[in-house]
Image (tube, rainbow, N blue to C red):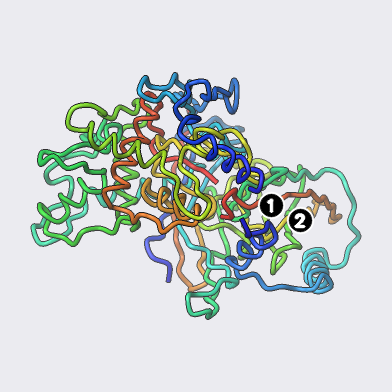
Amino acid sequence: MMKLRKQATAMMALGLLALSVGGMARAADPDPGVDLVINGDTKLVTRVPAPANIPGLKEVYSGWLFHDPTTQAMETDDFSNPAMLAVDAGNAAWSTVMGTEGKSCASCHNGIDSMKGVRASMPKVNKAGKLWSLEDYINDCVTNRMGAKALGWNSNEMSGLTSAISMQSRGMPVDVATDGAAAPFWKEGEKLYYTRTGLLELSCASCHEMHFGDHVRDERLSQGQINGFPVYRLKTTNMVSIHNRFYGCVRDTRAESYKEGTDPLRELELYVASRGNGLSIEGVSVRP
Amino acid sequence: MKLSRRDALAVGIGGMALAVLAPAAYAAAEDAAIATFTGGAALGTGGLTLTLPEIAENGNTVPVSVDAPGAVAIMILAPGNPTPEVATFNFGPAAGSQKAGTRMRLAKTQDVIAIAKMSDGKFVKVTSTVKVTIGGCGG
Amino acid sequence: MASNVTPRVKVPATAKVGDVITIKTLISHPMISGQTKDKDGKPIPREIINRFTCDFNGKNVIDMTLDPAISTNPYIEFDAKIDAAGDFKFTWYDDDGSVYSDSKTIALG
């Protein structure tokens, strides 16, 4: 960590110049020759050339590639993967009536397979022109159509539904829109990605663009891709949402962090998702 | 940056609210757990495999498996934990092997122990070191 | 009592006589070790699944003792020998007296 701090300070001296120079882009496959195959038959895309609007990276890598083989193995079989407990819970919740209108999710949407592709395009600008995360779309249904109380962003009820919905897009490429109505939100997210925060004065890029593959203590920094979310973290032994992970990361720079379900994190989610455009949605993943 | 590695370790361990025990207390609990399983019989070696990651990415969830062809039962101990017992597998007549796996909590870097009771009543022991790390940002 | 405790078990649908099959089980459970404290610093009492058994056609496959060092959402993997078609019965025993069970049928083929 001390080492990283020194490098971060050095980079700060270089300022924005360092961030805008294409020559800084790193391309080092974190786990050459290793592929993520689930249940012996579903091969997921864990490395693709970086999207054109992400000049800081040459190739993008799923976080799965950065971890120990024993951690990787937990995601390769749906009966070893503890995140599947949340998927089971979400599938059950899908057809469970809640709220005053006597409806379940299935009352309007039929089988959960109708959600195929939804996770891959999130977050997305809604009809009213606001950028919404998957959790926002769920809570819109829960409150306005079902007459129930909004689910907490970090609640088990919410992570069950996001996990089960995400599974419907497993293997599909991340494909978030960055142009048109999404463009101004994407720009804001990009700005936030490169903004240094906290006592440590680290931006997302300080670790996840300029130092992915390097070690912080004994852990390898990933690119911070979010194609694997929702994630079962071995540390907390529960499901972690994208915003919850962002919250923790910003907090760890010793900053007052943004709360889950706020616009800055929706914008950051859009921008970070776009950095992984082309990677497979993993459904639910396992990370340390 | 003023937060030293030692401070960060203290924070991480404090979060797990582990009792701080003297080494002697650890050893006594370990010996008692072994004696309960073996009845004080001598411990041999061989025929028992203990599979663990060399480095656990998070001590809260560490995959472990044991394999001892012909065993009746296998016990796993983590002497560096607040209580050493982890699990005991007893194999029945319909078992397809004397192999089993699970996931365990390790409070710190330590030598994990497995002891198998073989069908002839003898006991064998094996140990394996696991380094338990703390996430990059102290988590 | 732990809420929403649900097991998840993988057994192949078919096997041949003499086959050794691998069974994987997961169950959602917090496995409160008794070593943790709440926000006010009070110890949280232990509440774990302390025993797991698997039987095939009434014969025992494995009988496991679980201690507080087993991780949240216990995962257990083991092998069974198939000598006939039949039923697997899986049982998890909670400290609070609750018993959770599941069963799977395997056919010869």
Q: Is residue A41 visible?
A: no
Residue at 53%, 34% (x, y): give it. Answer: A14
Q: Residue furthest front?
A: A13
Label 1: chain?
B
| C31 to the left or right of B57 | left
Q: Which mark is residue A269?
A: none
Q: Splitting the image into 4 quarters, where does residue A156 fall?
A: bottom left
Give B74 or B10, whichever is nearer the viewer: B10
| A200 to the left or right of B29 | left
| C105 to the left or right of A113 | right
Q: Earlier in the sequence, mark 2 or mark 1?
A: 2
Q: Amino acid at mark 2?
A: Gln
Quarter occupied by the C terminus of chain B: bottom right
Q: Which mark is residue B132?
A: 1
Residue C98 lies, in percent from the top left, at 45, 69
Position of residue A264 relative to residue A254, above or below, is: above
Position of residue A276 relative to residue A7, above or below, is: above
- Which residue does the numbered mark 2 point to in the structure image? B110
